[in-house]
Image: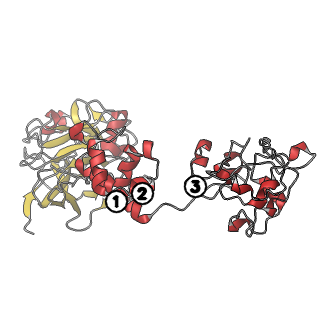
Amino acid sequence: MKWLLITLSVIVALIIIGGASQIIAGSAPVPTMAGTNCISQGCHEQQNGNANIYVGLNGRNVTSEPELSVNAGDTFEIDFHFTGMLGQASQHKGVGALIAMPEQAQWKVSAGTDSHPAAWSEKGTGESFWSPAWDQAANGSNGTGAKWVACSDQPTAYYLDFSASPWAVQPHQSVAADGGPGDPADLDGVADHMGADALVEVPFEAPAGIYKIMVSGIGNGIDGRPARVSKTISVEVHAAVTPTPPPAEVPSGQQLYSQNCSGCHGKIPLQQIAKTAPADAVKAMTEGTGSMPAFDQAKGGQLTARQIADIAGYLKAEAIAGPPPAAPPIAHFVKGRTDCLACHSQEAGMVPVPANHSSDNSQCQACHKAPPPMPHAPQGNAACTSCHSTNGPLQLAASHAGRKDDSCYKCHEGAPKPSSDASATPGATAAKPPAIPHALEGRQDCLSCHAPGGMISVPDSHSTYKNNMCTGCHVR
């Protein structure tokens, strides 16, 4: 990649000024006292060989080039501190800070954060010392009033304004006290040692390239003359990456069915609906049929043609898959037992339901069916299995094989259990079968008269009964 090399001077200027009497004869007044860029004015150009400066980028010490790699539009943090710029302590009282950005792009500077390199702390010395008072642009957001302000003669450069801060060395708005413990305005309490931080926002339109940043502490040498201590670092900027928005979520055919159809056709489509030919299903949803309105947006509905086709595809898939497995039947009579979850809740149930089941009692019997009630009273004949058995005239389900007569009443309700104990009756007493109104002699073939379509038709429930079953319930 061909990188564009752009020189970016970020100059942190710490200016040590005691007053007009400290200005060396023949030198110009310190420009930052008026909010200007003292570096571009040529006042503090000389390097101070007796001073040291330490710089951190995004919470780590700078040790190699490029020290930082970012994208255009990103924000990074500069932390810095330096020593040896106080000059002659008997004459100079304070320092200031300056950051100069490139002219061709509007790099923005604001107060830093509470973060700094982990190796720097209040307990350290020299390079490893860091005062909490230097965080957030010398605590600019914590009530001390210091803030970054654009220089009046160079809007792309920023100085740290202490005019409303306890740090201030009046009447100089860009000068902070650095006299140490004997100076109550020096909030870090350490003489000839100052620091600050800043957040730098890279312009979104900045071209890719290596940008040089010069961080400088500016003050006076031990000879009292204006000077600076500088460190040049590099920031590699990559072209801005425009994020690609995630594709809008497209509802599936199943979701669309659940949202638009399940209210009438059930959560799981009935097989007779699922087996509808896709073309017929599309037509019914598009134009409406019977009491079902048209769902096509062109006809005032809420679905697009694509969504209608997706629902039809879902119905076709359901038809191929076949009906879901049948829910197990209820294994007890249900009369008087309307609170299914009293026994079948997940929290305290003796037989808990699966996690995907509803917590609404009214939904249980939509899938789980109660055992059929007894259609007759036993009329003194409690031997249910004499008729109802795997080999008897009324076939039982294979799952009932081996069950005894007494077990019938645990699930099937409607007829009283033959017992003197009323508590043994699980449900209401069924209607008594009518008595046989004629003699039985020579009339053993009941079905010759009493059969569906016969002279005296029997109920549909009796359509499979045999002659030898009649007197089990009906008596002369």
Q: Mark 3 or mark 2: which comes first in sequence?
A: 2
Instruction: Residue 131 in the image: state x and y as whole percent.
Output: 38, 48
Q: Secondary structure at mark 1?
A: helix
Reading the image, the residue beneath label 1 is 127
Nearer the observer, 367 or 442 = 442
Instruction: Residue 28 in the image: state x and y as whole percent.
Output: 8, 40
Nearer the observer, 228 or 271 = 271
> Spatial distance from mark 1 to mark 2, Cα to Cα?
8 Å
**Residue 43 visible (yes or no):** yes
Compared with 218, 402 (above or below) is below
Number of callouts: 3
Compared with 398, 77 (above or below) is above
Residue at the spot 20% in from the left edge and 66% down from the top edge: 66
Reading the image, the residue beneath label 2 is 124
Number of residues whose C-alpha sits closer than 10 Å to that of mark 2, classed few (under 14), some (14–19) or many (20 or more) = few
Reading the image, the residue beneath label 3 is 355
Q: Secondary structure at mark 2?
A: loop
Residue at the spot 78% in from the left edge and 69% down from the top edge: 402
| Residue 176 sits in quarter | top left
Closer to the eye: label 3 or 2: 3
Three-letter residue code for mark 1: Glu
Viewed as shown, does residue 412 lie left or right of 292? right
Instruction: Residue 105 in the image: state x and y as whole percent.
Output: 9, 48
Three-letter residue code for mark 3: Ala
